[in-house]
Each structure stands twice: as C-alpha cells, then as structure tokens.
Amino acid sequence: MPISIDSSTSLAAQAALGRTRRGLGLALQRLSSGLRVNGARDDAAGLAIAARMTSHVRGAAQAVRNANDGISMAQVGDHALGSMVDLLQHMRELALQSLDGALSDADRGALQRDLQASRAELDRTARSTGFNGHHLLDGSGGVARFQVGAAAADLLSQDLSTSVRSADVGALAVATSGDLRTLSGTGGGGFAFAGTYTTVPLSTLDFSRPTVRLVPGAADVASPPTNYAGGQAAAFTVDGHGVTLNANYGSLGGVAQAVQQQLDATQPGGYVVTQNGSQVTIAHASATAAVAIANAAGAGSGAWATATGVPGTPASTSTHAGFDVDGLTVALATDYSGNPGGLAADIQSQLDHAAAGVYAVTGDAAGISIRRTNGSALPDVDDFTGIGAAVFARNASAHLTLAAGELSVQVGTGPAIDITGDFYSPEALVAAIQGHVPGVISVHVDQGSGRMSIDARQTVTVGGTQGGAGGSLGFAPSVNPATGSLDDADIGTQGSAAAAVERIDVAIDALTGRRSFFGSMQSRFDRIVETQQCEGALAQQARGRIVDADYAGEAAALSRCTILQQAGLAMVAAANADAGQVLALLRRPT
C-alpha cells in the first residue's frame, strides 16, 4: 500500500489558527481602546458618520462657551446701565429740588453743578464700559456676531450701536401754543381764556343779616281762675275754635292742659298752650299772627275776655357768605349796598392776609373777578357756605368750545385725536389732551407765559382750524419733531427745571429700555446654552453607539478566540506529528 505525505491538514490548522489570532488581536484592540471603530477597515461608513458627529459634539461644546461669553458681555452692559440709571434718578431728584420755591439762585446754581458732575460721570461710564475690546454703550460697538451652533451659519447678531451718552438720550418733541390768557378766536372757537373766576351779576350786596328764628304769635291770659265748676263755667273761641271750661282743674297747669286737649281735637298740632307763673299763654305752632281769643261767655270768662294778643316774628336766613379760593377761606358779613368796590376790597384783603400778592380781585355789582397774578391757571373757587354765597356762582360765558376738526393732536405715527368739548380753563384743555392722546408725556401751561406745551418722545403734530396754523390756539409750527438731549437739561432756574425733569424721565426710559435689551440678550444665550448642551449630549450618545466598543461582546469574543487559539495550536502540533511518523518509517532499516 503506498504511503503519501499530505501537509494539507497542517496548513488548514495553521490557517484557522491565523484567523483566530486576528480575531484575538481585534478583540484585544477594541477592549484596550474602548472603540469598536479603530480604523477605516473596521467600519468605513461608520467612521465617516462618527467624524461628522464628532464635529457636531465639539461644535456644540464651543457654542456653549461662546454663548457664555455673550452672557458675560450682557451682564457687563446691564450692570453699567443699572449704575447709570441710579445717576439719572439722582439728577431727577436734583431737578425736583430746584422746583422748590424756597430756594435761592445760589442754591439752584449748586444743584446745577451737581447735575453737571452726574452727567459727566454718566458719559464716562458710557464711554468706558466694554467687554474684550467691544464698546457696549457709546454706540461704537457695531453689530456683535456670536457663533452659537455647530454649523457655520449658526450666528446670533446683537446690535451694540445704540448710544446712551447724555448727548444721545433725552430728546423731546414739544408743541407750544400761543399765550392762552390773551388769545381770542373767532368762528366755532368761542375762545376767551383769561384764567379768571368771574361771578354772575350780584343780586344783593347785603351780607350782614344774621339768622333769625321764628317767634310764633300768641295770646297771654292773665290770672285766669282754676275752678269752673257749678255756675263758674266759661266758653270762648281761639281763632274760631271753641273751648269750654266747666270743671275745677285745681291749677293753672290743669287749665292749660284742658285748653290744649280741646284745641288739639279741632286743630291738631296747631297750638301750644303753656302756663307761665300766673299766666296761661296760647301760641301758634308756626304762624306769626297773634292768637285771637273771642266770644267769651260765662261767669268764669272774664280773664279770657281780656286776653292780650302778642304778634310773633317771622324767621329769616342769614345773608352771610363764605367760600374758598384755592383752599383759602373768605367770609363776608357786611352790607356793601351801594359800595361794590368795598366788597372787592374786602375779598382782596382776606386773600392777601393768607397769600399776599397771589390774587387780584376786581369788579362791581355786575360781577366780581378773581384771578391769580402769575399765570393762566383758573383759581379753584368752591366750598360755598351761607345763603349769600349763591350770588358768587361762576359766570360760564367765557370758555372754549371745540368741535370735531378744530383741534387734533397726533404723536408719532399714532392716530390723530380730535379734542372736543367745552373748556372753561386752560387746565381743563390740558387734562383733555393728556387723557385722550396716546404717547403724550405731559401737557402743561407755563404760569409765566401762559403758553401750553405738549411734550412727547416722538413727533407731535397739531392740526385743526383752531389748533393748526392761524388757529386761535396759536400752535406753530404744526409738526414738531423730537429734538435736544439730556445735555440740554438745566436746573439753574425754576422754569427750566420742569423741562429738565421731563428730559431726565425720557433718558431713564431709554436706559431702562436698553437694560431690557441686555436682559433679553442674556435670556437668549441661556436658552442657547441649554439647547446646545442637550444637542451635544445627544450627538455624543449617537456617536458612541457607532464607535464605542461593546465590552460584553468583545470580552466574549476574546474568550472564544483564546480557546480557539489554544485548540488551533494543539491541532497544528497534531498535524505535524502525523508527518513525523511517516519520516520515522522511512528511516527504519529494511
């Protein structure tokens, strides 16, 4: 039988051992690196996908850092603006203090210097506030762009070009009328403002009569008898009402009671019968005519027949008058008949005693006028007391009547509002404009010039036949854009301090609006950080599912390959042993 040497078994065993060694090496590599994909040969497509996910993960992490930088920038701007608003509040306090009439010019000069120092610090803060070279508050920062995502297009732009320096905030639009104390209109205007309280014609100038109470008419009966029994009966009439006395009443009080009862039976509540010492009095309850006792008959009627009638006195109400002028009390208790100038002088004297030089009182019986000596504001005359005060009712003939189309006020691009109605003082017109026109900051009448000013942050447009050019209210020009700035705020005089308060208020609104910008900027960046952190975590998990090693599976593969390697080595050894046995047979002698 021929014997052949076949090496295929050994080669097969060696090939299987090689595969096992490669599997063992791959398992060891994955377990030692922790990655399923250690090179392109492991998973070419997975490697490409994982690379893109790595870019997303690292881009999201960088976006979080960028957004946190944006938050820091916004916090710097917000803090600086908070400090600047505090400065403006201090400036506003100074302006309000300057409005105090008790201050001197020197006092206001000191306040003005303090305001200028605060304004300088405001500008310094605006110029110096920055973040990593970016100016935030002086308008030179331009547009800052923040990379807030993994892609190149994920940009967030923030406009830092708004300036809050004193020269760039506090602009006001002011529409100014003519002097409302002197202007008079024609046509539908019916305009006659003079800031004067004028009464109707006075029906009486006698304010001297005091209040007099009613004294009823009566009849006095002197020493009437008390015993009317037997033949002493008495009969008589009281203003035609019959009375009969026919008993012993024991006292004059009993007699008075008997008469009262009989009169109440025929005239309930009409009479009051009383006993006064030795006298009985029968009085009317309300009438002033004397009580008539007549038709006396009977033995006991002598005293009643000689009764004395006593007429009463009618009641009268005081003509004293009282009223308040801006809370200052005026009291009148004198007869000025034929002397109306004395009445005006008395009112003037009482007002001067409480507020010297503030009011001017003129007039006569045709009407008394009371006005403030400074300004167009109508005095507030009210709290009338006493019957005589009725003659001081206000004469309402002088007023401004505005119909549709005669006065309209518009702020910015808002609606043009028609102001209509009857207005008896400039202040009433002020209240109507202030209450009906949106966007108006304030409306006021200068007490020195009598001019009305309408203030707003945006352009004020005044129109209508009475409000526009040539109208009785004298607004010119019709279109008034916002001008000026906080640099124009001046509290050196009482008059300019009021305008300074408004400019400071506008500046405060501008800075607080800018603070809201930085606040919303922080909120957006907070949301971005939260979103990018979430996206990065999810992308990291997805990448891990592609490239990370499965330790349980790889450990099982390592154990399998280790066993297969040991078995393969044994098999290669066995295969080699078969060939050795054949060679041994060839070496034996024959």
Image (tube, grey):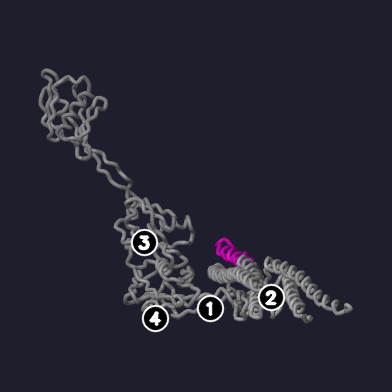
Can you give x and y, in whole percent of width and height, for residue 214 in the image? 27, 41
Disc 3 from disc 2: Cα separation? 106 Å
| Outermost residue, right side | 589
Spatial CA distance of label 1 from label 2 is 69 Å
- Amino acid at circle 3: Ile
Q: Is residue 154 left or right of residue 447?
A: right
Provide the residue designation for mark 2.
37
Please, what secondary structure does the residue beneath circle 3 have? strand
Mark 1 and mark 4: Cα distance apart in space = 24 Å
Report the residue marked by disc 4. 470
Q: Secondary structure at mark 1?
A: loop
Disc on the earlier residue, 4 or 3: 3
Q: Which residues are magenta?
A: 87-111
Q: Position of residue 147 (x, y in %)?
A: 63, 77
Type of amino acid under label 4: Gly
Q: Position of residue 203 (x, y in %)?
A: 29, 58
Say which of marks 2 and 4 sits in front. 2
- Magenta span: predominant SS is helix
Mark 1 sits on what residue? 483
Q: Which mark is residue 368?
A: 3
